[in-house]
């Protein structure tokens, strides 16, 4: 299947999950092996997240992983979903992603987020300086953008080779506030539907209404990332997703969460009524089900949000089950129309 077989671009968000019995090293190698396979299915981009002091998610160094993914593929756009800017000096980010863009021109995305992606103690260890945090985000964005501008910088500092080529910069978020920030900067906006599904349509509408054209983008551009697990039936999809879903339950109660459970653990777990209600509420707004269910939900999501692109977060323990989900999603999306520019979203 190629990208021309469906009009709405599909992409992948990877948190590099670690399951019981596996290792972070194995999870990273699985991610590198998966990228060229989804490229062959016609997926548009492949982003990796950033998490720290989180043993269940092996994504502590997205810049390094992006370079490896780019080397393993040829047409797939690769990038961060995202770099959590408060954790980093903008100069270092500009140098890293300027280097990635130099080595893989026209294929690198720099998605930026403002959350720490970790616990307070780890955030302090990453930042080293107490004056850098979410409140400093606008200044960090401005500094980072300056390093990608050609010419003599006012600071006298050159981020080699950032001035030679700028990656495609995206703003990430899960709230109307982040949508308005992206609009004010004239950046494309990626909304985390898997985190805050009930705000997706409103946030994207706010983004479009407030958008100001910039030197790099003349009209609003959006994507939604969404939890996706597709199998041959609704029941099979729920079973394949069960280890991740049980993991979500444990994240709410455990002081430390080292790995997602196995399929056997998920099958044998005695779910309480409250846990089943939590999982039903988690799954219902997402794309979890058989091909027909997912096609209908995807069509509804596109109509409701008007998103230009859909990014799939698929967290399942088996590499082949994961790839099968991407195959079935591409088939389900085939023929669904892309929203017209300036679409009016139903709220």
Image (cartoon, helix red, strand yellow):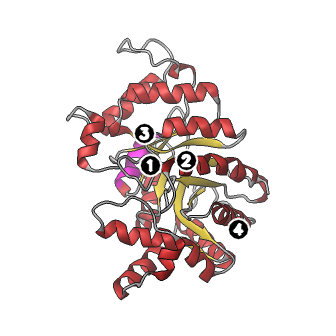
Residue 339, image x, y percentages: 63, 60
Real-space Cα separation, disc 3 to disc 4, in angstroms: 36 Å
Q: Is residue 347 visible?
A: no
Under circle 3, the secondary element is helix
Q: Residues within 10 Å of mark 4 (few under 14, many from 20)?
A: many
Do labels 3 and 4 touch, CB within 8 Å? no
The mark closer to the camera, 1 or 3, is 1
- Looking at the picture, does residue 149 appear above or below residue 261? above
Real-space Cα separation, disc 2 to disc 1, in angstroms: 23 Å
Under circle 1, the secondary element is strand
Report which quarter residue 128 is drawn in: top left
What residue did someone put label 1 on?
172
Q: Residues within 10 Å of mark 2 (few under 14, many from 20)?
A: some
> Quick one: 43 or 247, which is closer to the camera?
247
What residue is shown at x 65% (from left), y 66% (from top)?
321
What residue is shown at x 58% (from left), y 34% (from top)?
67
What residue is shown at x 40% (from left), y 84% (from top)?
271
Task: Say whether disc 1 or disc 4 marks the residue closer to the N-terminus.
Answer: 1
The mark closer to the camera, 2 or 1, is 2
Task: Say whether disc 2 or disc 1 marks the residue closer to the N-terminus.
Answer: 2
Q: Which residues are magenta?
A: 177-186
What residue did someone put label 4 on?
328
The mark closer to the camera, 1 or 4, is 4
Real-space Cα separation, disc 3 to disc 2, in angstroms: 33 Å
Under circle 4, the secondary element is helix
What residue did someone put label 3 on?
185
Q: Is residue 347 magenta?
A: no
- Looking at the picture, does residue 159 appear above or below residue 291? above
Report which quarter residue 276 is drawn in: bottom left
What residue did someone put label 2 on?
28
Real-space Cα separation, disc 1 to disc 3, in angstroms: 13 Å
Residue 177, image x, y percentages: 34, 53
């Amino acid at each position: 299947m190629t990208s021309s077989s469906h009009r709405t671009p599909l992409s992948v968000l990877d948190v590099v999950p670690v399951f019981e019995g596996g290792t972070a090293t194995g999870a990273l190698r699985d991610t590198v092996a998966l990228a060229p396979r989804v490229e062959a299915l016609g997926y548009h981009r492949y982003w990796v997240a950033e998490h720290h002091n989180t043993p269940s998610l092996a994504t502590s160094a997205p810049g390094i992983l992006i370079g490896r993914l780019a080397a393993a593929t040829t047409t797939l756009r690769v990038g961060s979903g995202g770099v959590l800017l408060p954790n980093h000096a903008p100069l270092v980010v500009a140098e890293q992603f300027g280097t990635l863009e130099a080595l893989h021109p026209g294929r690198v995305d720099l998605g930026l987020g403002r959350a720490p992606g970790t616990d307070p103690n780890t955030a302090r260890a990453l930042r080293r300086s107490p004056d850098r945090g979410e409140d400093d985000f606008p200044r960090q964005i401005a500094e980072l953008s300056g390093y990608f501008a050609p010419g003599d910088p006012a600071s006298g500092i050159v981020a080699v080779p950032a001035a030679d080529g700028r990656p495609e910069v995206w703003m990430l978020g899960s709230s109307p506030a982040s949508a308005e920030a992206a609009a004010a900067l004239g950046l494309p906006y990626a909304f985390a539907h898997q985190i805050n599904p009930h705000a997706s349509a409103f946030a994207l509408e706010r983004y479009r209404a407030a958008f100001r054209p910039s030197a790099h983008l003349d009209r609003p551009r959006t994507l939604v990332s969404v939890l996706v697990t597709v199998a041959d039936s609704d029941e099979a999809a729920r079973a394949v997703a069960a280890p991740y879903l049980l993991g979500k339950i444990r994240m709410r109660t455990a002081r430390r969460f080292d790995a997602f459970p196995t399929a056997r653990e998920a099958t044998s777990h005695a779910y309480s009524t409250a846990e089943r209600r939590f999982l039903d509420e988690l799954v219902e707004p997402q794309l979890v089900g058989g091909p027909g269910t997912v096609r209908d939900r995807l069509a509804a999501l596109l109509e409701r949000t008007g998103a230009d692109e859909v990014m799939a977060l698929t967290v399942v323990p088996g590499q082949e089950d994961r790839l099968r989900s991407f195959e079935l999603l591409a088939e389900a999306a085939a023929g669904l129309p892309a929203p017209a520019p300036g679409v009016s979203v139903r709220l």
